[in-house]
Image (cartoon, grey):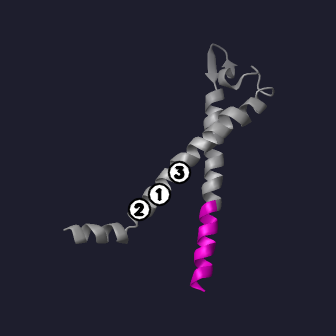
Amino acid sequence: MIKEFVEFLKEFKVISLAVAFVMGVASTNLITAFVKDIFMPLLSPILSSGAWQTATLSLGPIALAYGAFLEAVLNFVILAAVVFIVVKKVMKAEEAEKK
């Protein structure tokens, strides 16, 4: 049973998956800090309220707080771009290795 478990770990590259997960969490925290602490403060003068955390859009009696949503969108876009670039480079390296 232990031998089967070891084979399972090797076959499905569980260690690589675990490393990728940890790196993903770390990069998410890094990108969140970049957006929240560096990018969004630079964007604050452009926003109507001046402070991105409290930025709202009033539609009659409804106030839409869009500051935090804007931060989440920027986090997603930056993270998606990084993942896209990494996957593209890995795929290119794998193709070159096959030749």
Closer to the N terminus: mark 3 or mark 1? 1
Q: Which residue is mark 1?
A: 19
- The reply to whether callout 3 and callout 1 are in contact (CB within 8 Å) is no
Amino acid carrying mark 2 in the image: Ile
For this orientation, the residue located farthest to the bottom is 99
Q: Which residue is mark 3?
A: 24
Q: Which residue is mark 2?
A: 15
Amino acid carrying mark 3 in the image: Gly
- The reply to whether callout 1 and callout 2 are in contact (CB within 8 Å) is yes
Which mark, residue 39? none
Taking the spot 44% from the left edge, 60% from the top edge, the residue there is 17
Which contiguous range is marked in magenta? Answer: 86-99
Please name which of the two marks, 3 or 2, marks the residue nearer to the observer.
2
Looking at the rendered image, the quarter that the N terminus falls into is bottom left
In the depicted structure, whether residue 88 falls above or below residue 38: below
Within 10 Å of disc 2 (Cα), the crowding (few <14, some 14-19, many 20+) is: few
Would you say 37 lies left or right of 2 here? right
Closer to the N terminus: mark 3 or mark 2? 2
